[in-house]
Structures are given as C-alpha cells and as structure tokens.
Amino acid sequence: MGCGASMYPLGGREKKSVPEVVVYVPSMRLPAHADLQRPLRGLIPQDLVDRLACLRNQIVLVAEDTGGSAVTELRRALEEYLSLLIGLTKKEHGLEGLVEFKWKNLESGRQENSVANSWFELLSVIHMIAMLTLSEANTLMIPKDRSGSGIRVVSSDCKRDAVDLLLKASGCLVFCVREILAHLPPDIKKTFSKDFQDGVLEAISIQALGQGTEIQLGFAVESQKASLSVKRRLACEQLIYFSQVLSSLTFIVSQLSSLVFVSIQAYHFLSGLDMSNGHGKKHLCFIKWKFLEAKAAAYYYHGLILDKGTEPACHVSAVCCFLAADGLLSESKKACLTFCLTAPVTRSPPLWGAMKHLHQKIPEVASRKSQMYGYLLEEEKALQALPDLPDFQLSLAPDDYVLPEIDPAWDRNKWGVHSQPLKEHLKDSEDETGA
C-alpha cells in the first residue's frame, strides 16, 4: 500500500494512523495457512516435512501478529524457510506441484492466490523479502526527532543504509523476473494479481534504483565538494530511472509504447489512467510525483550549467530550463498531494534532500534569471526552445540476489527411511478422500 513499515507499530495493528511515505512499498502479501503435512507425508522424511510446515506457520503467525513490521525476525525466518523450500522445486524430487500454497493481502486480509506450485511459493517468498527490505528503507528515511528540539532529521548513516537496502530489494525483484517466472507455466501466471506480474515487478525494481539515486542527489546537494556537473548527472539519472518505470508499466495500456522514452507526454498520458487493481492507482501517483520532481531537478541543474556560457543563446536556453523547472515543480506539488489523498491515505514527510533545497531555489532563480534576461527572450524568440537534457549511463545497479544453499536435510543419502513412491502416495490420498 506504499507504507508497509510505517503503517503498523511493532507488536500489533491496533494503533491506526496516517503513515508517512518516503520509499514506496507496494501492498504486502503474506502467506496464509496451507497444509504441507498431508501432500508430503511418506514422500520425504517426516522431520523435513515438520520443519517446512513449522517454519511456514511461524512466518504466518509473526506476519499476522505484527502486520509485517517485525522485519528482522521475518527476514531471518524467510531465509531459513527458503533453504528448505528450494528442495521442493528440484525436478529429481518430483514434488513441484503437490502442495497448494496460499497467500493473502496484508491490508484486506483477502486471499489473493492459491497455487499448487513450489516455484510460485519461491516467487512469493522472495517478493516478500523484497517488500520487507523496501519497508525497512522507508522506516530509515522517516525523519525522527531524537533531540526533543522539534526538528526532525534523517542521519547520513540512515540514508546510506537506505540506499543499500534499496539495491538489495531491487536485486530480489530482478531475480524474481529473470530466474523464477520462467519456471511458471502461463496458465498459472494468468491467475496472478496485476501487481505481481513481471512488468510491475520490474518497475518496482527500477523504482528502487531511482529512489537510491534520489538519496545520492541529496548527498550531493548537501556537499560543498560536489560540482554542478555531478548534481546534474544524478538528477538526470533519477529522471531516467523513473522514465523507465513508466515504460515498464506499458502493459496497463498498449498505447504508451509509442510515447517518447523520457517525454513529459508519458506523464500527461498516464495522468488520465484509472487504475482500480489494488494499490495500482496509488503506485502510479507516486511515480508521477517522483517523475516530475526528477525532471524539475534535471532542468534546474542543466540550466545552471548552460548559464555559465557567454553567448546570448546560452542564457536564453538557461532561462527556458529554469522556467520549465519552475512549472514542473508546481506540478510535482500537486502530484504529491494527489498521491497522499489517493486511497489508502498517506502523508509526505517534511521536505528533505535535494527537494528541500530546490523548492526554494528553483522559483527564486527562475524569477531572477527571467527578469535578468528578459530582453534577450524578446530579441531571441526563435531560440526559445527547451533544450534536450543530456543522456548518461546509469550508475546504480541492483545487488545480485543469491539463493541460500539448499538445506542438507534434502540429501537423499542421509534419509534414514525409504520414501513412499509418488504413485502409491497419490493412491493413498485418494483412498483417504473417498473414505
């Protein structure tokens, strides 16, 4: 829902408040109770079945009791469960489609998917790890008043840790798209909710990189050593990431594929969309907001560099950049409000990072420079065209996600009992059902 970590306090979901959002966290999905004992009985050692069932039940209970806020405990349990779960996906064991795994939406509590496929369970677990990681990054970026002064700040260490978490979450989602979805048949993928399709997973992965770049831009703005070129590069990279997110969401409407890659047309086109699938509409509002902020920052810093030129055309182009940045900033404020008011209602934290600086500087510089070079604008009307932004190779990349080692309990040489052949097991199950 875009606010997983800050929605519920640790220890329960009773306290209701309007959460703050810095890092957008899509709606969290939690495992629901599923029967692992009966389908697997006699096929693998009972202690292995018990461990699988016990760990999954533990994850279900902790997630339900804390609303997903016990990030450390849940992540540890999920990693341990993964090492056991991997065994169910191995072809040599022949267990891939025996267990029907169930998952539900955290906020609504409604069951979203029930699929008899261990690759689906693997996908869901790694997706949950990614969402918990985004949620932790959001928590780190929510400003806190630890001094009692009334001034809320986010420490540099928290910001750096948040960037690391964003790269990890991005890596988890890339792994889901590239390494797991290929193992799932099309008929199963058709049953997934829209926020669980590969296009959306890819979009969230890229979005995490964009938000990591946003934090880095904030560091650059606060640093006296960072040059204008560095700030412009980071702003342009942030814009490219969020433009890619828009491109990844093209499955929503096929027409979007014909739009210019980083064009503001994409934003205006998406503004008219009415998405009703879960939290898709709020997610899209967030992307619009960040897209506009990034574009405003990119044009502002591009304008400052152009303004260092000595030719009249340089100053005219710079003013065009400043005026464009001012207009985009005004639109971004409206987009922020729209995002906050779109259900589920959230609130934005105090201005931070680059935007804390730019909300003051952009209107000020746009006004001053347009007055300073007003005569040039009148004389060089033919030059009043918004210049193209430079293109840069992207700096941030997802961390490589690596599955944990398969649990030694799956070593057949160590199994003390002879497992029941699958055909006999299925026959026994049918006999029990008919009894």
Image: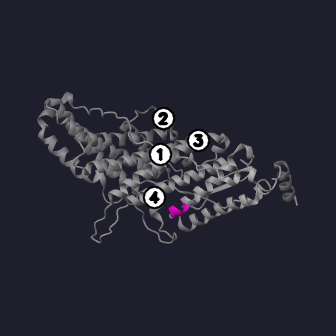
Q: How far apart are labels 3 and 2 at the CA level?
A: 29 Å
Magenta-highlighted residues: 70-74
Residue 314 in the image: state x and y as whole percent: 18, 32
Q: Position of residue 408 (x, y in %)?
A: 67, 53
Q: Nearer the viewer, residue 122 or 46?
A: 46
Q: Tell me, for residue 255, which label it has, or none.
A: 2
Disc 3 on helix, strand or loop? helix
Q: Earlier in the sequence, mark 2 or mark 1?
A: 2
Which mark is first along the chain, 2 or 3?
A: 3
Q: Quadrant of the C terminus?
A: bottom right
The quarter of the picture where residue 36 lies is: bottom right
Mark closest to the chain's N terminus, 4 or 2: 4
- Which amino acid, by three-letter code, is at mark 2? Gln
Helix, strand or loop under label 2: helix
The mark lying in front, picked from 1 and 3, is: 1
Answer with mark 4 or mark 1, whichever residue precedes in sequence.
Answer: 4
| Picture quadrant of residue 233 | top left
Where does label 1 land, which residue? Answer: 399
Q: Nearer the viewer, mark 2 or mark 1?
A: 1
The image shows a total of numbered marks equal to 4
Q: Is residue 314 above or below residue 112?
A: above
